[in-house]
């Protein structure tokens, strides 16, 4: 068990360091490869510092050679660190536009190819989804938390439609994933506690959004939710 404030004392400078490296890497690698490797090193260091053990299953189900949208539950603050290590391919984050305004961190996200979504009003949201779908069709895989925020008690919150609209417009498979254990490491709305523990990530079978077997609308949302729910620890 580590005092959360002590963890932040080391983790915040660590984040700033790798953000600067990612920005500098983007100056010599416009495709974001160096920035992405910085993100992987940042996440690994953050997990080691917290004493987190990572277990991954189902990675063989992630399709190779085509873009996908990863969708899963959002348990806690360590989900981003964990997914950065667990996802078996290069990916981009689909994140709130406000995060890209954070000094250093936001610039590093752009350099790494992460995709902003403006949710300030409906018209801007649709335009940003169209832009994101274009990026995905061009080959970028992304991660989406369909709940939109972290859970309070570990149960799945209602899903928002934005990620599913994006998947249908991009026409790429959705790969569901389930995170377990993140809440034990650092519960929501607590900054004074970091508890070393195991976090697991389970990938489910891809769900098509185009072709003869494609699902749309509510049936698609239900199928993704059922897959994520099936992996949750009781």
Image (spheres, helix red, strand yellow):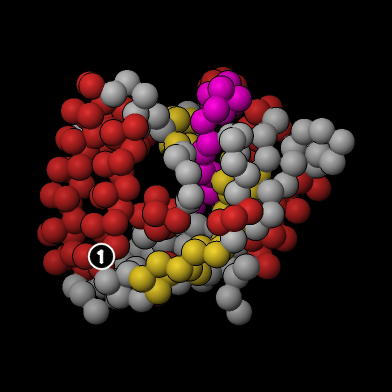
Q: Quadrant of the N terminus?
A: bottom left
Q: Is residue 144 magenta?
A: yes
Q: Quadrant of the C terminus?
A: bottom right
The reply to whether residue 146 is visible in this rendering is: no
Which residue corresponds to mark 1? 48
Res 77 quadrant in image: bottom left
Residue 175 % position (x, y): 63, 48
Measuring 69% from the left and 60% from the top, which residue is drawn there?
A: 227
Res 64 quadrant in image: top right
The reply to whether residue 131 is visible in this rendering is: yes
Measuring 21% from the left and 47% from the top, which residue is drawn there?
A: 15
Residue farthest right in this picture: 212
| Image-based side of 47 in relation to 94, left or right | left
| Image-based side of 98 in relation to 205, left or right | left
Per the rendered image, the range of residues in magenta is 132-149
| Image-based side of 7 in relation to 159, left or right | left
Residue 23 % position (x, y): 22, 29
Residue 225 % position (x, y): 69, 56
Answer few, some or many: residues within 10 Å of disc 1's Cα (few below 14, many 20 plus, some between 14 and 19). Answer: few
Res 101 quadrant in image: top left
Does residue 211 lie above or below 4 as drawn?
A: above
Measuring 51% from the left and 43% from the top, which residue is drawn there?
A: 143
Count of marks overlaid on the render: 1
Q: Work out whether residue 83 or residue 72 is closer to the camera in this orientation and state it.
A: 83
Does residue 48 lie above or below 108 as drawn?
A: below
Residue 128 % position (x, y): 53, 24
Q: Work out whether residue 162 or residue 67 is closer to the camera in this orientation and state it.
A: 67
Measuring 13% from the left and 49% from the top, which residue is drawn there?
A: 13
Q: Considering the numbered disc 1 on the image, is that residue within a helix, a strand or a loop?
A: helix
């Amino acid at each position: 068990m580590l005092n959360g404030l002590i963890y932040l004392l080391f983790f915040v400078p660590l984040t700033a360091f790798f953000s600067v490296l990612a920005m500098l890497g983007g100056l010599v690698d416009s495709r974001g490869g160096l920035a992405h490797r910085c993100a992987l090193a940042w996440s690994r260091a953050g997990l080691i510092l917290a004493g987190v053990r990572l277990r991954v299953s189902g990675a063989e189900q992630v399709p190779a050679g085509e873009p996908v949208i990863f969708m899963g539950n959002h348990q806690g603050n360590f989900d981003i660190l964990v997914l950065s290590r667990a996802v078996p391919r290069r990916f981009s984050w689909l994140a709130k536009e406000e995060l890209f305004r954070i000094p250093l961190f936001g610039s590093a996200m752009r350099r790494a190819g992460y995709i902003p979504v403006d949710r300030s009003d409906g018209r801007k949201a649709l335009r940003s989804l169209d832009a994101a779908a274009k990026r995905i069709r061009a080959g970028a895989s992304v991660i989406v938390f369909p709940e939109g925020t972290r859970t309070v008690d570990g149960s799945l919150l209602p899903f928002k439609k934005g990620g599913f609209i994006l998947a249908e417009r991009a026409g790429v498979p959705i790969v569901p994933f389930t995170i377990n254990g993140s809440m034990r490491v650092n519960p929501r709305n607590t900054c004074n506690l970091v508890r070393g523990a195991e976090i697991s990530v389970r990938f489910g079978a891809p769900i098509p959004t185009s072709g003869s077997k494609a699902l749309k609308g509510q049936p698609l949302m239900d199928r993704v939710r059922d897959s994520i729910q099936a992996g949750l620890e009781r």
